[in-house]
Image (spheres, rainbow, N blue to C red):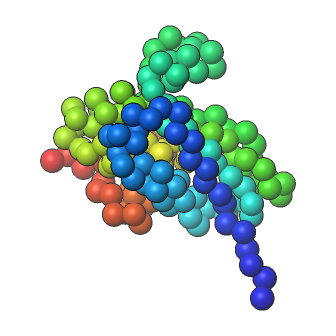
Amino acid sequence: MTTRALPTVDVVVLDDAWRAKLRTCRALVARSAAAALAGRGVRRGAGVVVALANDRTVRLLNRAYRGRDKATNVLAFAECDARSPDPASLGDVVLALGTVAREAEAQGKTLAQHAAHLVVHGTLHLLGFDHVEEAEARRMEAAERRALARIGVPDPYRIP
């Protein structure tokens, strides 16, 4: 019997405030990224790193890599094609705690629900999903809904 290595999800907590606000942040992030990767044909041994940062760190990254001098909720940095035969990193996903927490409150969601959605969203970007065109956005949102349903998170696009 051969064992197939699953994609790996490494969680790096860059700001301890994540642990204070979301006690189960590591487990939630790992489950969320794994749900986004499930059934996507990702090569064996490929990995994703999710960094839980603060707004300042994400602002610096956003300015350096996207030319936008502001914090944003999530950034995704793809390293290679997700279906490449070489088992390497798919890339990194970085979340900004302050922005994520403010958005969750404004949208009437828990921090855990919104963080899970953004991890799924960022992971799907690493897999080549995008939302620039309307058809792409619909496809990405459907993939997000399916991944979040796998882990019991409500549809983030449903209007209450």
- From what the image shows, is residue 118 above or below residue 101? below
Observer able to see residue 141: no
Q: Residue at x 32, y 40 (%)?
A: 21
Q: Residue at x 36, y 27 (%)?
A: 98
Give x and y (percent) for residue 101: 31, 33
- Left or right: residue 73 versus residue 153 is right
Q: Quadrant of residue 100?
A: top left
Total labels: the figure holds: 0
User: Is residue 35 visible in this depiction of the protein?
Assistant: yes
Percent position of residue 121, x then y? 48, 44
| Residue 60 on image: x %, y % | 55, 16
Identify whether 74 is placed above or below 146: above
Task: Give the farthest residue toward the left.
Answer: 160
Residue, x 47% and y 32% (percent of image)?
15
Residue 92, located in which quarter of the rendered image?
top right
Vertically, is 15 above or below 144?
above
Q: Is residue 35 left or right of residue 153?
A: right
Q: Residue 108 is drawn in which quadrant?
A: top left
Residue that lies at the very extreme toward the right in this rendered image: 86
- Relative to 3, does residue 65 appear above or below in the rendering? above
